[in-house]
Amino acid sequence: MAAIEMRNIVKEYGDGFKAVNDVSLDIADGEFMILVGPSGCGKSTLLRMIVGLEDITSGDMVIGGNRVNEKAPRDRNLSMVFQNYALYPHLTVFENIAFPLRLKKNITEEEVRRRVRDAAGMLELDEHLERKPANLSGGQRQRVAMGRAIVREVDAFLFDEPLSNLDAKLRGQMRTEISRMQRRLGTTTVYVTHDQTEAMTLGDRVAVLRRGLLQQVASPRELYEQP
Ligand code: ADP
Ligand code: ADP
């Protein structure tokens, strides 16, 4: 069974414009799927429909075997990492990472600390747990956003151009880190980018969108060897 199944997904805006036009795509359990295509092709809209931030006009979104079309984002058990990090400026790194756990009932403080430390360790944030986001570098902020995504067990991670605000060197580093983290955790991942290097190096498969249509789904190798 696929972790995420999209069946004939359509997103139509007020004026009848179809930002996403009849997209069907299965993402396997543990798979790293890239959504790529030029600006305006519908990548973010599709990702936002998976996570529940955007209503689906028609079609079915099935996550973990359950149709989630009408489910609120917080009932979908997914973690999204945004381009602008969306950190809480008044909270420390520790509390930013712990935030999703604070919304859970039946979790002890000890368990919260253990999980935050595990996530922080994986992302080399151990020494910055008491700092505030304003005192961090761009790369560190991005790591905190990732820490918040991995601190609880979810059905999938969703990334919306997470590296586009970083310089080229840091982007390369973070690419390696995201890839390592995903393999280690084995969590199904959907990653939106318009960056060819990210598309060709990060994913198990790449879904190419153009004007709302799914044009092709292939492994990076198949895309590379294409005439
Ligand atoms: P991408 O992420 O690939 O850059 P988006 O998913 O953000 O593309 O947008 C897809 C298309 O839908 C674009 O043409 C965009 O202008 C349009 N669009 C996005 N949001 C809205 C909206 N709220 N109302 C009308 N059109 C929108
Ligand atoms: P990104 O390229 O990072 O996805 P955009 O600048 O395309 O961001 O969109 C930012 C916001 O504006 C989104 O919430 C999107 O839904 C909205 N938006 C984009 N295009 C349109 C549009 N044509 N009409 C109304 N809202 C839009």
Image: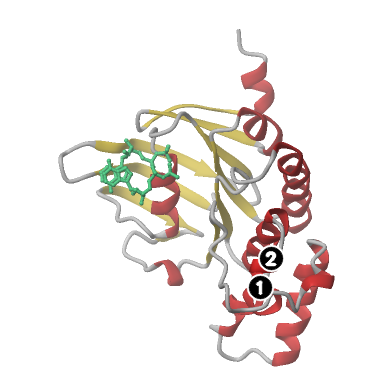
Furthest-left residue in view?
A: 15
Residue for badge 2: 147
In-image side of 151 versus 191 (left or right): right
Q: Pointer 1: residues within 10 angstroms few (<14), some, or many (20+)?
A: many
What x and y, as percent, mark residue 147? Answer: 69, 65
Q: Are marks 2 and 1 in contact (CB under 8 Å)?
A: yes
The three-letter amino acid code for the residue at tag 2 is Gly
In-image side of 227 versus 68 (left or right): right
What x and y, as percent, mark residue 56? Answer: 30, 52
What x and y, as percent, mark residue 14? Answer: 17, 46
Residue 1 can be seen, yes or no? no
226 above or below 47?
above
Q: Is mark 1 within 8 Å of ligand 2?
A: no
In-image side of 6 versus 227 (left or right): left
Q: Measuring 73% from the left and 75% from the top, which residue is drawn there?
A: 131
Observer-nearest of 65 and 83 = 83
Q: Measuring 17% from the left and 38% from the top, which residue is drawn there?
A: 16
Observer-nearest of 212 and 27 = 212
Quarter of the displayed picture in which ligand 1 can be seen:
top left
Quadrant assignment, res 138: bottom right
Q: CA distance from mark 2 to mark 1?
A: 6 Å
107 above or below 120?
below
Residue 87 can be seen, yes or no? yes
Residue for badge 1: 97
Q: Pointer 2: residues within 10 angstroms few (<14), some, or many (20+)?
A: many
